[in-house]
């Protein structure tokens, strides 16, 4: 009898506690510290936060380690306004899938079909549109001259990067291989380069703001560029802040043990070299596979 009373008492206490935790989770008061959290964390934890960050032009992919407060201050934004929007999102629920806990295979499949395939369609068309605008309107002072060449360079860099992921890194991750610190650091480094290339495109094309009187081609070009920017940032966010961070949480010290500064990008400039780096003996000389010649200390 005593056991039954204790059991019922425990269930009642447990129910009350759950209710309290629920109210804490969704109470705006609990978001007072949102401004101190990193943009990457917030993008990962609050579905829809990426839309808010796009709206305020806050870089949550390559600049994901900056706190919201720091990033807002750099752009001269009122952090309280942004924090309230984020708290509102958390209260109203998700409209984007939460990829945490989905497993590497499902997330990799999403990255390939939703982003890699998409960028391969987007960039040739953007280059075509940019060449057309430059050819017809090149004499206008606000014409984005040089944009087509910048896009072509970015297409090459992105294609090379995606091939490394597709041919080397992603197969390793979906097979459960854990010794991928070097390739992860290189991928993070290249993501930062993509961010810099994107900034160059924005500078050339006046932040993709369509000028008054722009023709349909010009309007289509800037609309496509805005979409490309959003897609690329979401792509990098899912890799940096969820896929790679997930590896760190499950035992692969992807960031702490292999800071980008310690990796020579030239070593892993091609998929074949990246494979060689991964295949280097584990636990041998301790060079981490980052030496010249594809991981060789010999
Ligand atoms: Fe990717
Ligand atoms: Fe990537």
Image (tube, grey):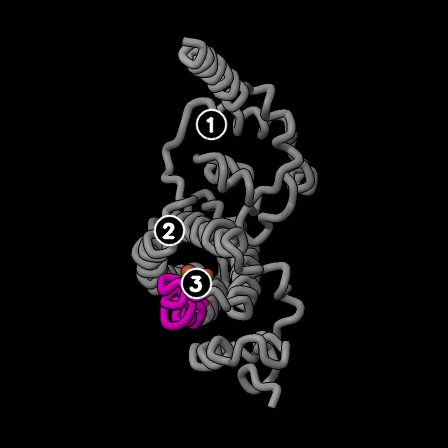
Q: Is residue 270 left or right of residue 113?
A: right
Find residue 3 and report its horizontal and vertical position in percent.
43, 14
Name the residue at 43% across, 63% down.
134
Label 2 element class = loop
Q: Which residue is mark 2?
A: 103
Find residue 19 and report its horizontal and vertical position in percent.
47, 16
Q: Is residue 18 visible?
A: yes
Q: Image quadrant of residue 155?
A: bottom left
**Residue 89: mark in rendering:** 1
Label 1 element class = helix
Q: Name the foreground residue: 111 vs 199.
A: 111
Q: Which residue is mark 3?
A: 134
Pointer 2: residues within 10 angstroms few (<14), some, or many (20+)? few
Region in magenta: 158-177
Name the residue at 35% across, 60% down.
116
What is the CA distance from the residue labelled 3 to the residue labelled 2?
45 Å
Name the residue at 46% across, 22% down.
91
Q: From what the image shows, is residue 290 above or below residue 49?
A: below
Pointer 1: residues within 10 angstroms few (<14), some, or many (20+)? some
């Amino acid at each position: 009898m005593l056991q039954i009373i204790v059991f019922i008492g425990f269930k009642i206490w447990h129910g009350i506690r759950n209710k309290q935790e629920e109210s804490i989770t969704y109470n705006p008061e609990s978001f007072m510290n949102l401004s101190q959290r990193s943009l990457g964390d917030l993008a990962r934890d609050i579905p829809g936060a990426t839309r808010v960050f796009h709206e305020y032009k806050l870089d949550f992919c390559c600049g994901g380690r900056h706190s919201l407060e720091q990033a807002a201050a750099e752009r001269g934004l009122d952090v309280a306004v942004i924090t309230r929007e984020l708290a509102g999102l958390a209260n109203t629920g998700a409209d984007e899938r939460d990829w945490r806990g989905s497993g590497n295979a499902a997330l990799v499949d999403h990255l390939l079909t939703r982003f890699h395939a998409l960028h391969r369609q987007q960039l040739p068309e953007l280059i075509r549109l940019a060449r057309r605008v430059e050819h017809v309107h090149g004499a206008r002072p606000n014409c984005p001259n040089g944009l087509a060449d910048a896009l072509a360079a970015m297409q090459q860099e992105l294609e090379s990067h995606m091939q490394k992921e597709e041919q080397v890194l992603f197969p390793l991750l979906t097979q459960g291989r854990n010794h991928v610190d070097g390739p992860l650091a290189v991928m993070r480094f290249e993501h930062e380069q993509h961010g810099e290339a994107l900034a160059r495109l924005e500078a050339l094309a006046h932040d993709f703001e369509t000028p008054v009187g722009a023709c349909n081609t010009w309007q289509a070009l800037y609309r496509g560029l805005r979409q490309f920017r959003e897609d690329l940032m979401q792509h990098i966010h899912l890799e940096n802040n969820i896929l790679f961070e997930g590896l760190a949480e499950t035992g692969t010290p992807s960031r702490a043990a292999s800071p980008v500064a310690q990796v020579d990008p030239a070593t892993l400039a091609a998929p074949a070299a990246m494979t060689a780096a991964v295949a280097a003996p584990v636990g041998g000389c301790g060079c981490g596979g980052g030496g010249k010649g594809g991981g060789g200390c010999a």
